[in-house]
Amino acid sequence: MLSPDGRYLAVAARKLELWNAADLSTSATLWSPDQGAPDPIPDSWPTDALSLQYSGAVAISPDGATIADGLYGGRVRLWDPRTGRRIAEFSEGMGRGKVNGLAFTADGSRLAASFSAPIEGAPKGAVIVWDVAGQKPVFDSEVSTGAVAFRHDGLLCASTVNGVVFLGSSGAEVGKALAATPNVMAMNKEGTRLALRTRHDDNVVQLWDVDQLKVLRDFRAADSVYALAFDATSSKIAVGNESGSVEVWSAA
């Protein structure tokens, strides 16, 4: 994930690293497996060498002062990218599924994480929202989700098998759901436009107006879409695909 000022990337794979955006060189390693054992996970879950540590979920607060990462066993951690110090660690999601997605509110005061179990018959998953300063959960909702993002009014958008639902401050569903079931999605910084990959066609990206609950336009990528991001002006969408290439589309 690219920092708000465009200076660095936070990358969570086998390690949590910061890369210089200009040349993609590694500027810092915040954590690596030799600094601690992996989270305990149920015996029935897949445990290949790559999956033991990171789920691949990472988020950066709007002011760039905090990085959140998620582990395969459900642990969520907060880091200070300037000092490399771990600020906090949340364990409420452990055993409830791997961390699928992370998102900060526009003011950085809250962090949402989505969880889903990697096998059939495991716990259904969850969406948990924390107060970042108080380091405590605001709500904990038992719904299996993929991606999460906050709308401009603070409602949490969560992708489920029933569509993209909106969760209020108590975790209850609010209003109508979007008629889409995305695996990948991204919200613009204003919290008014949602780009998502549909479950029915991995090459198709839809741009939604989250207030009017309607599709503004469709894009067809050259290959299966793995990542989405808006630029700082919300006028363009970057689409990363399975082949390793990146396409840029107009979101105007």
Image (cartoon, rainbow, N blue to C red):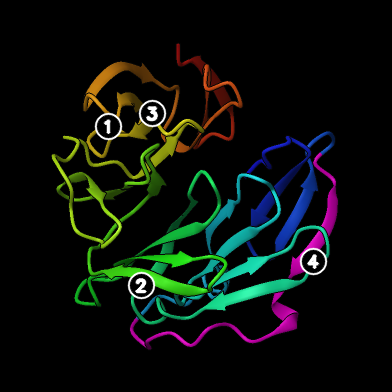
Q: Horizontally, is 9 left or right of 138 in the view?
A: right
- Residue topped by disc 3: 192
- Residue topped by disc 1: 201
- First reached walking from the N terminus: tag 3 or tag 4: 4
Residue at the location (19% across, 36% down)? 178
Query: Circle 3 sits in a helix, a strand or a loop, which is it?
Result: loop
Mark in front: 3 vs 2: 3
Mark in front: 1 vs 4: 4
Residue type at mark 2: give it: Gly
Q: CA distance from mark 3 to mark 4?
A: 33 Å
- First reached walking from the N terminus: tag 3 or tag 2: 2
Residue type at mark 4: give it: Gly
Label 1–label 3 contact, CB within 8 A: no
Q: Which residues are magenta?
A: 24-44
Q: CA distance from mark 3 to mark 2?
A: 29 Å
From what the image shows, is residue 37 above or below residue 182? below
Disc 4 crowd rating (10 Å Cα; few below 14, some 14-19, many 20+) is some
Q: Horizontally, is 141 left or right of 228 in the view?
A: left
